[in-house]
Image (cartoon, rainbow, N blue to C red):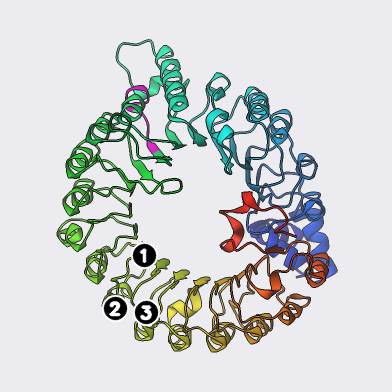
Amino acid sequence: METVPSAVLNKEILGRLDIEALCSLACVNRALRFSVESQALPSLSSLHLSTISPDGQTLIHILGRCKALCSLTLNCLRLQDHSLCAFLTPRIRELNLWCCSSLSYQILASIGHNCPNLRVLMLELADKESPHLFENNLAIMLTSCLQLESLSLKIRGFGVEVDACAFQSIIFFLPITIKSLKLQPVLERDAFFLIRRVGRNLMETVQPPILTSSYYSSFNLRSLSLVLDVITDELLITITASLPFLVELDLEDRPNTEPLARLDLTNSGLQSLGSCHHLTGLSLTRCRYNHQGTFKRVNDMGMFLLSEGCKGLESVRLGGFSKVSDAGFAAILLSCRSLKKFEVRSALFLSDLAFHDLTGVPCALVEVRLLWCRLITSETVKKLASSRNLEVLDLGGCKSITDTCLRSISCLRKLTALNLTGADITDSGLSILAQGNLPIMNLCLRGCKRVTDKGISHLLCVGGTISQSLTTLDLGYLPGISDDGILTIAAAGIGIIDLCVRSCFYVTDASVEALARKQPGQEKSKQLRRLDLCNCIGLSVDSLRWVKRPSFRGLHWLGIGQTRLASKGNPVITEIHNERPWLTFCLDGCEIGCHDGWQFHESGFI
């Protein structure tokens, strides 16, 4: 490396590496460390740290050398306001802050004061303070960031007050430059006021009698995403009337009780979407978070009207349409010829018949997700396999999926993600997958009770493409997985960086030892980044010794909830934390990364 000209080294080599690769390279020798610290880090314009949860000291050590950052993405699980404020500068154009469990609402005002040139802001906060305090700080931020184009604000928690008050006054301060807006949570009545105000401002800026998209440059909202208490016809009609140039619409509701007939979504609401002629992305879901309800007043006719009015849709996501049958869903598939992403959740009457004619029409599908659709069988998968461009296939909860469709799946040469949660597949089926030329990176076999250690051996030891490409593997809730399966993963799963074995009761300390001893001894071999051992009751406290240095060199997140390891105040965990301040322990049973549930943690993290 000493013979490489410094200009080539810095621009063509170091300039193409991410922060983790740069840090690893800096450990090779003094010359490379000097180049990384003096040239690469100071010239870094974008930094993405969402997979690790740094504390304040670690963040200072990393960001202290990054003087040219314009884009910053952080997992703020262990960060306080003062740790972050030092790195908020006028140079920042994009700021994404995830899992802000300890940040106060004051951070909004700090962002406004220090980042006046901000274009993109994504902020995920915990509901811990007064909604009025949130409103005041939000107003300061919005009136300071006058060039903001994309705003995503999520407040996570149980706070009823926040649900009622958080975004009531946002419209008074929203910059006119906003093109994309995402808010969670917001009441339907507040959403009405917001949409009507935006629509009125938009219409006031348009003087010519013939309205075209070129005139909508002042308040040009193109993407709207809201998590509401209820979705109604009146809301959809208001959206289509006020925002005719909307390109993406994402609405989710979480009703506490069954909505009244006049305060619910019906076929008429879906019909009104036909007025949005530019709409390419549509998501309508009813979440069972608070109440086990569905869109009971929408049937096949509503889907017929939607498919006729919105033929330009490229992405469709529908959840909770319990009265829609195969005919309604088939209308979407056959009418929207540019459809690339199709997702349906909890459709009681969706069966193989909806996909019967799929092979007879041109198919542009790239991503298909059919979640908890109990009538879907392997026949649907065989039809979907005709779409050779398919990259994501999610069949989570479709329990009638069997080995018979896996040969069809193995022919999908572009498939990178496959979810078979709860499917009735066997070890023989995994052998078929392994023999195909599948570049699968993300594979979920959670709850596939007939999969055993032998199946994992078939999957990884045959020498197929999947053994080289696989980076994320979920084996949760598999009674047939024991130490033998984990030993196979440690030896043959060279690219796996995320591994979930939660509730695998026959996994013991020997598995942790095998994973800890895994060394990057060959090309493309990687270290584990995230490991979920939640509810692995076969583990003893002694297995924690394998988490100490020098084992698990790349580990960022470790889930040990509901195990003997999860004793709060355990001195061994404290010792490991002092050795590895970037390693997050989750003691509360979260899924990998704590992306859902972090807002409820108090002392569950170290």
Q: Earlier in the sequence, mark 3 or mark 1?
A: 1
- Residue for point 43% across, 42% down: 254
Question: Tag 1 or tag 2, which sits nearer the N-term?
Answer: 1
Which region shows up in magenta? 240-249
User: Element under label 2?
Assistant: helix
Residue 186 part of the magenta segment = no
Horizontal relation, residue 596 to residue 394: left or right: right
Report whether 230 appears left or right of 177.
left
Q: Residue at x 58, y 32 (%)?
A: 161
422 in relation to 458, above or below: above
- The disc labelled 2 sits on which kind of residue? Arg
> Where is mark 1, residue-wise?
397
Residue 454: % across, % down: 45, 89
With respect to residue 443, does 6 lie above or below? Answer: above
Q: Quadrant of residue 215?
A: top left
Tag 2 residue: 407
Pointers 2 and 3 in contact (C-beta within 8 Å): no
- Res. 4 visible in picture: no
**Local crowd at mark 2 within 10 Å, few (<14), some, or many (≥20)?**
some
For the residues marked 2 and 1, what is the alpha-carbon distance in whole angstroms?
20 Å
Which of 196/290 is in front? 290
Q: Secondary structure at mark 1?
A: loop
For residue 433, which numbered disc appears in the image? 3
Q: Position of residue 445 (x, y in %)?
A: 43, 73
Above or below: residue 132 compared with residue 386: above
Image quarter of the C terminus? bottom right
Q: Amino acid at mark 1?
A: Gly
Residue at mark 3 to residue at mark 1: CA–CA distance: 19 Å
First in residue order: circle 2 vs circle 3: 2
Label 3: few (<14), some (14–19) or many (≥20) C-alpha neighbours in 10 Å = many
